[in-house]
Image (cartoon, helix red, strand yellow):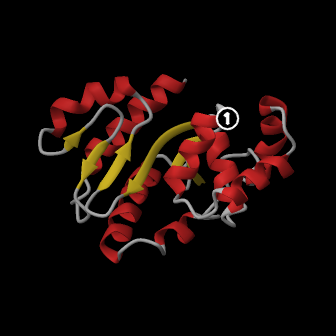
Amino acid sequence: MVANQKDPSREAHFPLIEKKYGEPMSYWFDVMAEIADQKYPEQIAYLRENHGFSQSHANAVVMYSRGSKSTQRFNTPSDYYKTLNPKQAKTIRAIFKTITTKYPELELVIAWNQPMLRIGKDYVFGVSAAKNHILLAPWSKEVLAKFTPKMKDLDVKKKTIGVPNDWAVDEKLLQAMVKARLAEIK
């Protein structure tokens, strides 16, 4: 099941784009045809600077004109894992297993093209894979701040924690962070 219930298609933006920028989509596709030889960042900048587009609206038009009809890349966590190197996939599976063993009521879903745990509509914990590390997201600045002293050997940022691709999963830390996040939600 996909967590984000919004329509992931690029076309979902089109009615608002037409209303907000005062032209039918055929007009915007003609504009895109005129700048088709430009690179993605240049096309985005063109729409933003010359037509006042927001980043998300510019992205929808540019990506649609480039053939991408949907923002959704993965339907299931398994689909996501298949795109990772084996070491990352193993670590991320271990992270979620550690959490869901203690908290089986949490649902593992895909949201923003990343695996996330949620309860009801509230997100509890998420993971994202970069090339050289994995990012953990406890979905709470307060929870992150509370546990930062226990993560001196990890790369703690404003909203995420960076861990190595082959991180030895700290079960107590993860379960304590999830417990604190669940207490916030309730």
Name the residue at 44% across, 34% down: 139
Residue 6: x and y in percent read: 74, 44
The reply to whether residue 1 is visible in this rendering is: no
Residue sticking out furthest to the left? 153
Which secondary structure lies at badge 1? helix
Residues 177 and 152: in front is 152
Q: Residue at x 22, y 31 (%)?
A: 148
State whether residue 172 appears in this view: yes
Q: Quadrant of residue 180?
A: top left
Q: In which quarter of the image is the N terminus?
A: bottom right
Q: Which of 175 and 29 is in front in this view?
A: 29
Whether residue 141 is situated above or below residue 160 in the rendered picture: above
Query: Residue at position x 57%, y 35% from top?
Result: 49
User: Can you give x and y, in whole percent of width and height, for residue 26 in the image?
Assistant: 85, 52
Q: Is residue 38 shown left or right of residue 19?
A: left
Residue 154 in the image: state x and y as whole percent: 18, 45
Left or right side of 54 for 90: left
Label 1 amino acid? His
Is residue 147 rendered to the left or right of residue 62?
Answer: left
Identify the residue at the far front of this view.
Answer: 34
Q: Quadrant of the C terminus?
A: top right
The residue at 30%/72% (across/down) is: 87
| Label 1 environment density (alpha carbons within 10 Å; few <14, some 14–19, many ≥20) | few
Q: Which one is in front, 50 or 149?
A: 50
Asked if 110 appears above or below 143 in the picture, the reply is below
- In the rendered image of this protein, does residue 4 appear above or below residue 67? above
Residue behind mark 1: 51
Question: Total of numbered circles in the picture?
Answer: 1
